[in-house]
Image (cartoon, rainbow, N blue to C red):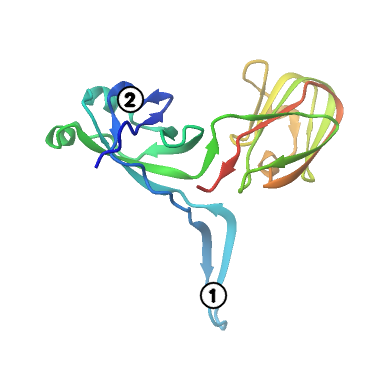
């Protein structure tokens, strides 16, 4: 039985505006931890090693409605953020695995299945913003490691940032943005600023719970932004 007005938002477009609805919400999936099994000659059993990462998983959304098939097919492709109407405060990063078959839609009378590959986390839509001083202790309610964005209005001399004892140094610049999820840094409207950073952005992450952030140098208007992130 169809749920009344169950819908989704993909790439900032509401499926209701396309007359597309969900037959049911997908089941919650607990992602699998990535583990390598190692067999060693002369040793009973096996060793198991993990890099702490999780594998993506699959969803199949059954959709129906009185919609324009060509219009829907041109919208539901590629990678983007998905929000379900039973939890409008959170989003999933998904990739549509296959293009929608218009012939299949015609045969099944305005009904189709949307196959998705889902990244192994769900996160808040709304960002949390923290104004940073010299010494900061931040409580992050995530249940898994969480990337973040750092913003500075100005850095007038070399500034050092330590986050949970992982350190980078930044040369003088203006309107700097560091995105630890995309592993990029830019200033003044997307001018590449990676050459002004010494250190490894790969190591910068917010842990669940308490995080210690220290700044030293001359800078103005330092902010940290993140979205709470959980496994499911």
Q: CA distance from mark 2 to mark 1?
A: 51 Å
Q: Horizontal and vertical percent for residue 218?
A: 86, 24
Residue picked out by circle 1: 46
232 sits left or right of 178 in the view: left
Question: Residue at position x 54%, y 38% from top?
Answer: 123
Local crowd size for mark 1, using a 10 Å CA cut-off: few (<14), some (14–19), many (≥20)? few
Task: Look at the numbered disc 1 and give the secondary structure of its residue.
Answer: loop
- State which quadrant residue 43 falls in: bottom right
Q: Are marks 2 and 1 in contact (CB under 8 Å)?
A: no
- Residue 69 is left or right of residue 7, and the answer is left
Residue at (54%, 80%) from the top-left corner? 41
For the point 48% across and 56% down, the residue is 32
Percent from the top left, x then y, of residue 5? 32, 31
As rendered, which of 46 and 131 lies closer to the eye? 131
Using residue 85 as the reference point, say whether residue 33 is left or right of it: right
The residue that disc 2 covers is: 16
Determine which quarter of the picture holds residue 212. Answer: top right
Q: Secondary structure at mark 2?
A: helix
Q: Is residue 34 above or below residue 153?
A: below
Mark 2 vs 1, N-terminal side = 2
Please tell me which residue is depicted at 18% across the width and 34% down the height of the picture.
105
Q: Nearer the viewer, residue 38 or 1?
A: 1
Residue closer to the observer: 128 or 202? 128
């Amino acid at each position: 039985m169809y749920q009344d007005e169950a819908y989704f938002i993909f790439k900032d477009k509401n499926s209701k505006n396309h007359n597309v609805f969900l037959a049911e919400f997908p089941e919650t999936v607990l992602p699998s931890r990535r583990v390598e099994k190692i067999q060693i000659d002369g040793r009973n059993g096996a060793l198991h090693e993990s890099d702490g990462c999780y594998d993506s998983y699959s969803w199949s959304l059954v959709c129906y409605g009185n919609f324009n098939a060509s219009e829907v097919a041109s919208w539901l492709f590629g990678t983007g953020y998905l929000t379900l109407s039973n939890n409008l405060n959170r989003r999933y990063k998904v990739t549509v695995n296959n293009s929608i078959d218009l012939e299949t839609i015609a045969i099944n009378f305005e009904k189709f299945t949307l196959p998705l590959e889902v990244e192994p986390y769900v996160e808040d839509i709304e960002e949390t913003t923290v104004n940073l001083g010299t010494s900061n202790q931040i409580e992050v309610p995530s249940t898994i490691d969480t990337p973040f964005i750092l913003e500075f209005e100005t850095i007038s001399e070399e500034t050092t940032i330590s986050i949970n004892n992982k350190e980078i140094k930044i040369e003088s610049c203006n309107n700097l943005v560091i995105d630890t999820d995309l592993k990029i840094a830019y200033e003044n409207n997307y001018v590449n600023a990676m050459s002004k950073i010494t250190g490894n952005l790969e190591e910068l992450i917010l842990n669940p719970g308490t995080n210690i952030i220290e700044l030293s140098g001359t800078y103005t208007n330092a902010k940290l932004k993140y979205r709470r992130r959980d496994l499911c």
